[in-house]
Image (tube, rainbow, N blue to C red):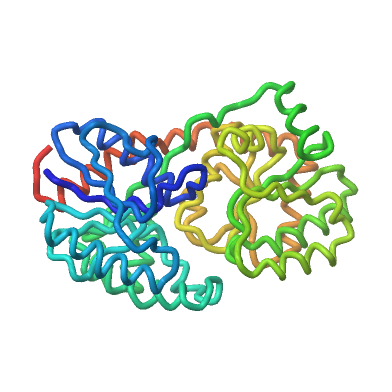
Amino acid sequence: MKIVVNTRSLILDKLDGIGWFTYQSLKRITQNHPEHEFIFLFDRPWDASFIFSKNVTPIKLMPPARHPFLYVLFYEWSVRLFLNKTKPDLFIAPDGLLSLGATCKQLAVVHDINYHHYPKDLKYFYSKYYNYFVPKFVRRANKIVTVSEFSKLDIANNYKVNESAISVVYNGINEGYKVLSETEKEQIKKKYSKGLPYFLFVGSQSPRKNLVRLIEGFDSFKEISGAPHQLLIAGSSFWGEEKIKMALQACKHNDSIQFTGRLPQSELQLIMGSAFALTFVSYFEGFGIPIIEAMQCGVPVLCSNTSCMPEIGSDSVLYVDPFHVNDISLKMQHLYESPELVQELIKKGFERKNAFSWDHTAEKLWEAILETTNKQA
């Protein structure tokens, strides 16, 4: 088969959830199936580490798609012309963005539809683009893949798509996440949290990550408990940071909150493994990779009881209502005051994380590819 893949999300040292799904699944698929030809479409110069095997041919198309107006030109002009000329067996979009004018079969990976539920959480033109085009992409796709049962039902119900057209392919856990020694933990705490235990958030500072309430809940926890714990927020900045800055200014304990910015994967693994607990209180997620990465590290997880998170966390995490600051504060205090609860969550997390692996992700995605192209393994 000849398979073309939109690999715009493969940017060196800047992989997010979609980028990791693309990287980890396509690396395995291309290497496991050398009999097939893969063409990777980039909109900027690519790094050699993304050309996983000899059966991968990278192509750069114009223009660089870094704004919704340019998305339209990229997919409906450059990608359309390339696909209609190349005539592949399949076009795969790991970020869900298809080419409506292309005539070949297309598979869209729609991780979630947060922009449908919270359109104001994105910049105006991004929100308009996703809410206008993604429903069209979903209807155009020959096959839809998503990363949780929650997202499957969400897409089916809101975009009126038959559930049988949607396959669920869970994310996996990146290499390098592991239980650390006490010596390693102490070194990281000295570097990032003044040598003190810390709650950790990992992710972008997008409004749906709910950082304002997390900061307010942490401040309340500090006031009530008198605990020495810090709060580390690790991830890239996002638009709308003014509300986060205002929340920080209003905090009595803002000297206990540290922003690390985006960190390399090697450092992020150490920060995760050294945390007292992961506090992942987003109000909307399609999967939530940090949840299972924390489990792999033997770190207890406090996460929201909304969207996909009860599905991913099962009975292995402590749940919180992300819209209530008092509940966030109270659950932090539960973890602080109960070593028994912490150990129970760690034990259950070790069991739960075994349900997720990138090998399984690649296998399930390949099954969806074969189903779409009507090919046999």
Q: Where does the image place residue 206, in percent across and percent down from the top left?
A: 59, 63
User: Can you tell which quarter of the image residue 199 is in?
Assistant: top right
Residue 114: in sight, yes or no? Answer: yes
Whole-percent x and y of residue 157? 34, 71
Question: As displayed, is residue 87 above or below residue 334?
Answer: below
Write the residue at 13% across / 33% down: 35
Which quadrant does the C terminus fall into? top left
Q: Nearer the viewer, residue 96 or 85?
A: 85
Is 277 or 80 nearer to us in this picture?
80
Q: Nearer the viewer, residue 129 or 181?
A: 129
Left or right of 224 in this view: 367: left
Residue 89 x, y percent position in the rendering:
12, 51
What x and y, as percent, mark residue 12? Answer: 47, 43
Q: Is residue 8 above or below residue 348?
A: below
Q: Image height check: is 293 above or below 76?
A: above
Q: Quadrant of the N terminus?
A: top left
Q: Residue at x 47, y 37 (%)?
A: 173
Residue drawn at x 66%, y 37% as measured from the top left: 271
The reply to whether residue 201 is in sight is no
Picture quadrant of residue 329: bottom right
